[in-house]
């Protein structure tokens, strides 16, 4: 494809997106949890900026009455004071979404709330199922009518159906987990229980927190800290935790041997906030270590090391620490640009990259600059940033990437485009360097991934094509909207 056409078509989307963030809370003293869930979702906004929602219930009031509100946009755009004032409850769940399967519509926003024979069930899901199309068809042939095009509804239906044949919601979740395959971290709200579940491979993070006489389940520890909760522990891969006033009940019957686990490596490289810890590992540490490895494996003489904000900053600091080359700031980021701002026309001089990012000319003029970024997807942003540095007076720009080249699709919740659109597909590192206009280019080696997560088993299928489970025979992303 012509390079200019790539710019025209994908100018605003040359970055990776996570699918979702989840947050649940149960206050045993009966205090309202709505505002805490709201602030928890704020802390998880980086995991999804497309839609969001909250569902709450009062365990003391009429059993099964759920107040829910959701919409398209950022947390502070969707939840007005009036919307929040109309929601009261001591148990609730929340969700932020970016779609990888299912279209971007209000109907697909979460949490999902189901009314069925046993009462009500609310669910929020982070991840992607690889067998959702088959499960959906099975349900449709038995009379199920779907309101959304997301795989999360398939999970909710299976939990509801299993609940008819067993004694508790948590047992229904366990039975549903035996049928679904892929990546999922769930928070489920029943009238008197808050349940968290994580797929056996542990693709997506999930943790437990406590604040006074309330328990929280969240995608990341940064959300716990935001609402003043203390970290209790991570939910184990394959574990189901059930929170009631009697405490936390754990079901580990779905857990698999530790060496079979497969955390998403990109949680550590890019998705998670740097102040989060996932399965005992500091995300900040992982990024610092990635930068150190880059300095060891791809040294170059230079005057300044800079990171592309925000996710490149920690790796840049690690590179500087290892190499002894000064770390500096070269970019000013516009913090008010969301995903939905009006895209400048190609006929205009304004560049969407410049709208989001400007270069500090005083910092780079006359200097050899090492620029650290977390990844290159299509390359349509990287080449513009390099051009901006050189236009600002940088004499050389050496690019270092704190992940290996993307070569394969992801089926587990990361929005990686088709292989043909990936800049590394069928190209050598030297080919990519020329396209970007960099003076040199170096990627983190696949063999270094183990070191940045302290040898915890991770999924790196997007780099190697080696997945922890058999991928679907065809690309299922967006399956229900084709």
Image (tube, rainbow, N blue to C red):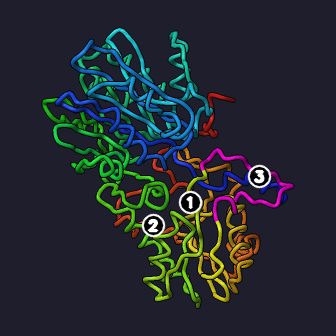
In this picture, residue 381 sits left or right of residue 469: right
- Of the numbered discs in the image, which one, if any, rests on residue 21? none
Q: Which residue is mark 1?
A: 463
What percent of the width, then of the height, locates residue 457? 38, 58
The numbered mark, 3 or 1, whose residue comes first in the sequence reads: 3
What's the residue at 49%, 28% (across, down)?
70
Residue 274 seen anywhere in this rendered image of the structure: yes
User: Which of these two is toward me, 60 or 183?
Assistant: 60
Which of the marked residues, 3 or 2, is nearer the chain's N terminus?
3
Say if 179 sits above or below 360 in the image. Answer: above
Start and end of the magenta stretch? 338-357
Task: Please state the horizontal and vertical placement of residue 298, each as a whole percent of the image.
Answer: 55, 82
Q: Tell me if residue 417 comes above or below residue 376 in the rendering.
A: above
Q: Which mark is residue 344?
A: 3
The residue indicated by pointer 2 is 449
- Residue 154 relative to residue 178: left or right: right
Quadrant housing residue 451 = bottom left
Q: For the N terminus, which image quadrant?
A: bottom right
């Amino acid at each position: 494809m012509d390079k200019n056409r790539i710019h025209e078509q994908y100018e605003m989307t040359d970055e990776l997106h996570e699918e979702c963030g989840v947050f649940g809370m149960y206050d045993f003293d009966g205090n309202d949890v709505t505002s805490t869930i709201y602030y928890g979702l704020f802390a998880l906004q980086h995991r999804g900026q497309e839609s969001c929602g909250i569902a709450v219930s009062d365990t003391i009031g009429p059993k099964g009455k759920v107040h829910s509100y959701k919409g398209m946009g950022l947390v502070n755009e969707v939840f007005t004071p009036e919307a929040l004032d109309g929601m009261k409850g001591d148990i609730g769940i929340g969700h932020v979404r970016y779609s990888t399967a299912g279209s971007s519509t209000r109907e697909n926003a979460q949490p999902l709330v189901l009314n069925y024979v046993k009462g009500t069930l609310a669910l929020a899901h982070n991840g992607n199922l690889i067998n959702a199309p088959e499960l959906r068809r099975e349900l449709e042939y038995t009379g199920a009518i779907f309101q959304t095009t997301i795989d999360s509804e398939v999970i909710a239906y299976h939990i509801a159906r299993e609940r008819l044949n067993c004694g508790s919601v948590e047992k229904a979740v366990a039975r549903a987990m035996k049928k679904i395959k892929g990546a999922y971290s769930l928070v489920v709200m029943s009238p008197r229980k808050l349940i968290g579940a994580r797929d056996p491979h542990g693709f997506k993070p999930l943790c437990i927190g406590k604040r006074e006489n309330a328990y929280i389940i969240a995608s990341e520890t940064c959300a716990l800290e935001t609402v003043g909760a203390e970290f209790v522990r991570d939910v184990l891969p394959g574990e189901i935790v059930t929170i009631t006033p009697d405490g936390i009940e754990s079901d580990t019957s779905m857990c698999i041997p530790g060496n079979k686990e497969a955390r998403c490596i990109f949680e550590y490289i890019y998705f998670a906030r740097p102040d989060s810890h996932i399965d005992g590992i500091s995300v900040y540490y992982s990024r610092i270590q990635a930068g150190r490895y880059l300095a060891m494996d791809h040294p170059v003489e230079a005057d300044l090391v800079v990171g592309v904000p925000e996710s490149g900053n920690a790796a840049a600091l690690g590179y500087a620490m290892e190499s002894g080359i000064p770390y500096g700031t070269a970019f000013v980021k516009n913090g008010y640009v969301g995903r939905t701002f009006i895209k400048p026309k190609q006929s205009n001089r304004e560049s969407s990259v410049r709208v989001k990012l400007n270069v500090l000319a005083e910092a780079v003029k006359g200097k050899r600059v090492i620029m650290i970024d977390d990844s290159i997807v299509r390359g349509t942003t990287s080449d513009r940033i390099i051009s901006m540095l050189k236009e600002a007076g940088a004499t050389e720009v050496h690019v270092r990437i704190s992940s290996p080249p993307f070569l394969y699709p992801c089926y587990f919740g990361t929005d990686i485009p088709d292989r043909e659109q990936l800049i590394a597909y069928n190209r050598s590192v030297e080919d990519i360097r020329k396209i970007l206009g960099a003076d040199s280019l170096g990627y983190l080696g696949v063999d270094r991934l183990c070191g940045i997560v302290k040898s915890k088993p991770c999924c790196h299928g997007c780099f190697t094509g080696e997945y922890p489970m058999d991928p679907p025979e065809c690309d299922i992303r967006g399956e229900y909207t084709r």
